[in-house]
């Protein structure tokens, strides 16, 4: 059960002494892990609750400290996987079969429906979003809270002042951020050149997710116009009909074509249409990373969410979770034309040193009002890059860094720790410690331009 912890923190293995109690329940269910943190999985000694709104057993009260081990009443690796892979959704009833049937019927008749009527149906379909109890809204970092809570337990059981680990982001950055553009129509495709101009005016890197078939013509000239300006090209679904994951054999047939388009487009990343997903099928996809799983999917047709604001591996692929509200949802479901919600999500993610991931469609920001909102977002992110040392990168850069970090190790040299491995020149040694019952991060060194220890977050 220590593998997940080590992948997350990249700390020396000698510090990680976690064990699981015997007698795990046969059924999975919900429990708490401190105030406001809801876990899901098998539980030892007590039956977990059937609902996140039930009477939840607090796992902190059931942790034992024996011979230098912190013995948890759950298997950390299984719980994290249950959350990331959205296995809790059946018990939460966030993704019911009834909803799936309705969605299939909708996509069958969608081409025949006027745009205004489609939006009315979409709002009705998602009308209960504010009543969903779990995951948390507007940002969910349950996985991060559970893993970081386990770090606190290690500090206590080993009676050490601090534990070293490899900081999450390169060059001591406080958080990471990516801008992604899903191109859905011919009009959106034709607006990409203008959008790239706007991004460049703020020094904003981005990726463009292209639908290969049926939606619009995709020429090599168009793809090259994106690449030559330093932006990334990724594959978005096959034909955007909402049925990619409806049948396993059909999925395999489509993925063969999707992978071929990935090679032709020189694309490392993939995103499914409408953020539909079945992560257990990802092994068929021949991409380095995916960007189809929301952290908290309240405003998505497929409810659920991976409950983390950090990248994580699903087999050979890295998942870059969608951690903020899509522009379409902001304008049409929340009916907001300001960046207030985005700012709230940014602040919550920044507090946890997570990944800010945005989906802004060229198709939906061509009008003046929507365009002004996007301009404000770009200005705010540019300010955060300067003021808060946020690393704004392409998804491909995040993917390369996270893979390099996953292979790095910490080695003690005298009184200090050093990072070994490819990419170590950008890595920073950080420390986790506990102050007044809260986890605190600090840096071993803080060169000019990086966060000082006093500025890092207390969790």
Image (tube, rainbow, N blue to C red):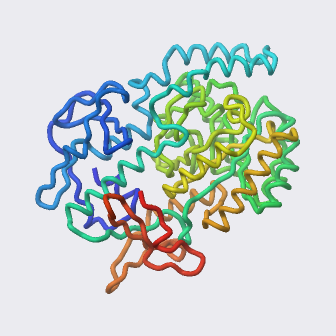
Q: Quadrant of residue 301?
A: top right
Residue at image position (33%, 79%) is: 412
Q: Quadrant of residue 228?
A: bottom right
State whether residue 402 is above or below residue 213: below
Query: Where does residue 72 sit, x and y in percent of width and height?
Result: 22, 47
Residue 154 horizontal side relative to residue 131, left or right: left
Question: Which of the two residues, 22 or 277, is positioned nearer the viewer here?
Answer: 22
Residue furthest to the bottom in view is: 414
State whether residue 56 is above or below residue 12: above
Residue at image position (11%, 60%) is: 67
Query: Where does residue 359 sit, x and y in percent of width and height?
Result: 68, 43
Residue at image position (69%, 17%) is: 121
Q: Quadrant of residue 170?
A: bottom right
Residue furthest to the front in view is: 436
Question: Which of the two residues, 396 or 458, is positioned nearer the viewer here?
Answer: 458
Question: Which of the two residues, 124 or 344, is positioned nearer the viewer here?
Answer: 344
Query: Where does residue 18 sit, x and y in percent of width and height?
Result: 23, 54
Query: Where does residue 352 sit, x and y in percent of width and height?
Result: 48, 55
User: So how many labels did they put on this image?
Assistant: 0
Residue at image position (65%, 17%) is: 124
Quadrant of image for the C terminus: bottom left
State whether residue 45 is above or below residue 226: above
Residue 418 horizontal side relative to residue 114, left or right: left
């Amino acid at each position: 059960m220590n593998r997940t912890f080590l992948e997350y923190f990249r700390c020396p293995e000698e510090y990680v002494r976690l064990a699981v109690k015997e007698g795990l329940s046969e059924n999975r269910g919900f429990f708490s892990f401190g105030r406001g943190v809801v876990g899901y999985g098998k539980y030892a000694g007590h039956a977990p609750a059937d609902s996140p709104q039930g009477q939840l057993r607090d796992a902190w009260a059931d942790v034992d400290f024996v011979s230098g081990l912190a013995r948890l009443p759950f298997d950390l690796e299984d719980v994290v996987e249950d959350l990331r892979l959205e296995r809790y959704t059946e018990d939460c009833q966030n993704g019911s079969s009834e909803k799936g049937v309705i969605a299939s019927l909708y996509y069958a008749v969608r081409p025949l429906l006027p745009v205004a009527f489609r939006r009315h149906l979409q709002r009705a379909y998602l009308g209960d979003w504010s009543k969903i109890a779990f995951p948390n809204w507007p940002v969910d970092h349950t996985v991060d809270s559970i893993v970081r809570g386990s770090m606190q337990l290690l500090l206590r059981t080993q009676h050490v002042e601090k534990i070293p680990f490899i900081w999450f982001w390169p060059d001591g950055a406080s958080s990471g951020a990516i801008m992604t553009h899903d191109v859905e129509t011919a009009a959106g495709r034709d607006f990409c050149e203008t959008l790239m101009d706007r991004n460049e005016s703020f020094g904003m890197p981005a990726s463009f997710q292209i639908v290969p078939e049926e939606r619009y013509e995709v020429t090599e000239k168009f793809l090259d116009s994106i690449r030559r300006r330093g932006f990334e090209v990724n594959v978005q679904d096959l034909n955007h009909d909402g049925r990619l994951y409806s049948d396993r054999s059909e999925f395999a047939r489509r993925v063969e074509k999707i992978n071929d388009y990935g090679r032709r487009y020189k694309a490392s990343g993939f995103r499914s249409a409408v953020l539909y997903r079945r992560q257990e099928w990802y092994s068929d996809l021949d991409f380095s990373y995916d960007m189809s799983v929301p952290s908290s999917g309240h405003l998505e047709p497929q409810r659920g969410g991976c409950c983390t604001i950090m990248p994580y591996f699903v087999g050979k692929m890295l998942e870059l979770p969608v951690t903020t509200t899509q522009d379409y949802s902001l304008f049409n479901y929340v009916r907001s034309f300001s960046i207030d919600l985005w700012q709230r999500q940014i602040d919550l993610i920044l507090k946890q040193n997570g990944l800010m991931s945005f989906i802004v469609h060229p198709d939906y920001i061509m009008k003046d009002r929507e365009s002004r909102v996007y301009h404000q977002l770009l200005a705010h992110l540019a300010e955060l890059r300067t003021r808060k040392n946020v690393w704004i990168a392409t998804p491909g850069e995040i993917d390369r860094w996270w893979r390099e970090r996953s292979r790095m190790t910490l080695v003690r040299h005298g009184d200090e720790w050093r990072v070994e491995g490819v990419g170590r020149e950008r890595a920073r040694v950080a420390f986790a410690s506990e102050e007044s019952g809260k986890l605190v991060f600090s840096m071993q060194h803080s060169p000019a331009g990086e966060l000082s220890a006093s500025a890092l977050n207390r969790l």
